Amino acid sequence: INEGSTKMPARMCPYCKANSNFSRGTVYADGAHVKSVDQCQNERCHMHVYFAASDADGRVIEDMYPKLDEKAPTELPLKLKRAFDEALLCQSVGAWNGTLCLCRRSIQEALIDLGAPIKGDLPKQLQYLVGEYRITSDLKDWADQARIGGKLAAHGTGGDEWGIPEKEWADKKDAEAVIEFCKSFFDYLEYAYVMKARLEKRRNPLKP
């Protein structure tokens, strides 16, 4: 066990929701992880957070408490927001397969909102939107990661599409990767969701 006050790489604080150069407190290494209880250095916060890192410098965070309470943008369509919020919640508690199932649903809700047929599977919905020039082929490829992840999580199949035929269960890296693909998909479609809602609010400031 070591004691120290070394400043750590900037991390998001779950209390003040801002990046902070945490001051390192007590450090314990258990072989696989370097664990510490560090103090946020942001003014008016100074709360303590538990971190478990896979490197001595504390740059690769594997776990933390409390967890970051990440939410989907409020401007997203309600069904899409609910699905992606639940995906983020699953990720925060380490439910990797649940994360992938909800990522798949959030993508499907987005495709339906963009005009894809309600009936039909996700590949057909994606192809329809590409054919109608609603999304690009790159967006289709990003969304397809959620399809594969959902297939793996729900049925234990699809690992071959990720180049790992024997894979039957999702892990942390799978969930993190698909979450990022979903975020990129929604960011790219921001003009259709977030900016549209903000423009409406700008035009009608008194509208709830």
Image (tube, rainbow, N blue to C red):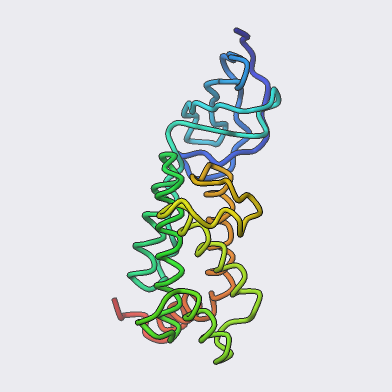
Identify the residue at the far bottom of this view: 132
Q: Position of residue 181 (x, y in %)?
A: 58, 61
- Residue name at image x 52 percent, y 85 percent: 129
Determine which quarter of the picture holds residue 155: bottom left
Q: Nearer the viewer, residue 161 or 91?
A: 161
Q: Position of residue 139 (x, y in %)?
A: 61, 74
Q: Position of residue 14 (x, y in %)?
A: 46, 39
Q: Is residue 76 left or right of residue 170?
A: left
Q: Nearer the viewer, residue 58 or 16?
A: 58
Identify the residue at the far left of this view: 208
- Residue name at image x 54 percent, y 45 percent: 18
Seen in the picture, residue 128 relative to 16 is either above or below; the reply is: below
* Quarter placement of the C terminus: bottom left
Q: Nearer the viewer, residue 129 or 199?
A: 129
Determine which quarter of the picture holds residue 78: bottom left
* Quarter placement of the N terminus: top right
- Residue name at image x 55 percent, y 36 percent: 42
Q: Nearer the viewer, residue 126 or 89?
A: 126
Seen in the picture, residue 1 relative to 123 is either above or below; the reply is: above
Seen in the picture, residue 203 relative to 20 is either above or below; the reply is: below
Identify the residue at the far top of this view: 1
Q: Position of residue 76 (x, y in %)?
A: 42, 71
Q: Is residue 203 left or right of residue 31?
A: left
Q: Is residue 169 left or right of residue 205?
A: right
- Residue name at image x 35 percent, y 82 percent: 119
Q: Is residue 176 left or right of residue 193?
A: right
Seen in the picture, residue 175 relative to 136 is either above or below; the reply is: above
The total of numbered circles placed on residues is 0
